[in-house]
Image (tube, rainbow, N blue to C red):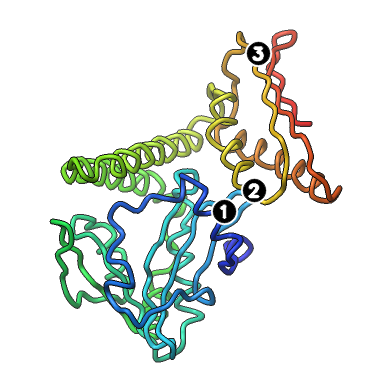
Amino acid sequence: MTALYIKPMTKELEDRIHRNPSLNIDSFIIPSPFVADESLEKDYEHSYVWEEERELLGYIETWADRDKKRLHIYKQVTSPFGRGKGIGSAFLNRLAEQAPEDSIIDLYIWERQTESLSFYKRRGFVEKERLAWRALTFVRIEGEAKTVREALQKTGTEGGAAEELGKVRHDAKKAIRLIADMAGALTAENCSRIIEDINRETTALINTLNLFRDSVQRFRTVNLKELVIDRIIPMIEHSPVPCELQLRFAPSVGEARAHYLEAGRAIVNLVSNALDAIRAADRPGILSIAIEESAGWIVLSVE
């Protein structure tokens, strides 16, 4: 199923990524390829995005030399709304599959992101050097494409029903440690960027916990207004389909009893279908989303 959502990077998708704040979490992504190796150029052939129902949930940006002997992972970002789907593992698997047999895959990781370092080392990467940059230390790790492919086959996919609780605990602890480390790296010069990233990592943590609660509690209260604001507005803002968005929220509407994950997917699907209809009409459209209460029911409509 993951192959259905992974697409090659294009300039159009890249523009959508740049306008999506949920995908611009990169306080500790360094060094720029221009600093690390001036011979590298952005490689669209080995860069990918994860698009699910028109919603961009992650991307991996790769730079390479002319002969594709070195593939440098410059950025690998997952949206707070895509955590827990195995997007990072899927990207690495796709990159290793399509990389030339004798190529080297490498990247830099902040030394305090120990879980990320362990993740890559379990998949055939080894530490090569350390680099100090802006009072922070980064580790460069690399692996041969062939070795990474073999390690991925042995590792398999992460997760599974029996391991879900342990995975959620691990992801939650990882997010909390990363937020704490971000706070520890806060300075007057970088405060604006790091505070934004802390906010987004906090959103990712809450989303991870919400998804787990869905798995053990079939129905619970869900704020539909927050779902629309958090997921639908960014989705429409960054969509290439031209349309005007109109929102109508009744002030007295309470929370709905629903499945958090399925409610979010249902709204995304409705809006995705509406955008398809606008695009098929080949003219700018108006998308109206309303939430109101009628006879004890909460009614959400998309027109």
Badge 1 or badge 3: first in the primary sequence? 1
Q: Amino acid at mark 1?
A: Arg
Give the number of the disc on residue 220. Answer: none
In the rendered image, which residue does mark 3 sit on? 250
Q: Is residue 147 visible?
A: no
Quarter-of-image position of residue 136: bottom left
The image quadrant where one finds the N terminus is: bottom right
Q: Position of residue 10 (x, y in %)?
A: 59, 67
Badge 3 or badge 2: first in the primary sequence? 2
Q: Which residue occupies 35% across, 37% down?
A: 199
Q: Amino acid at mark 2?
A: Ser
> How many other residues sit within 10 Å of disc 2, few (<14), some (14-19) or many (≥20)?
some
Q: Position of residue 288 (x, y in %)?
A: 74, 29
Q: Are marks 2 and 1 in contact (CB under 8 Å)?
A: yes
In the rendered image, which residue does mark 1 sit on? 16
Q: Which numbered mark, 3 or 2, is in the foreground of this view?
A: 2
Helix, strand or loop at label 2? It is loop
In the rendered image, which residue does mark 2 sit on? 239
Q: Is residue 222 above or below residue 60?
A: above
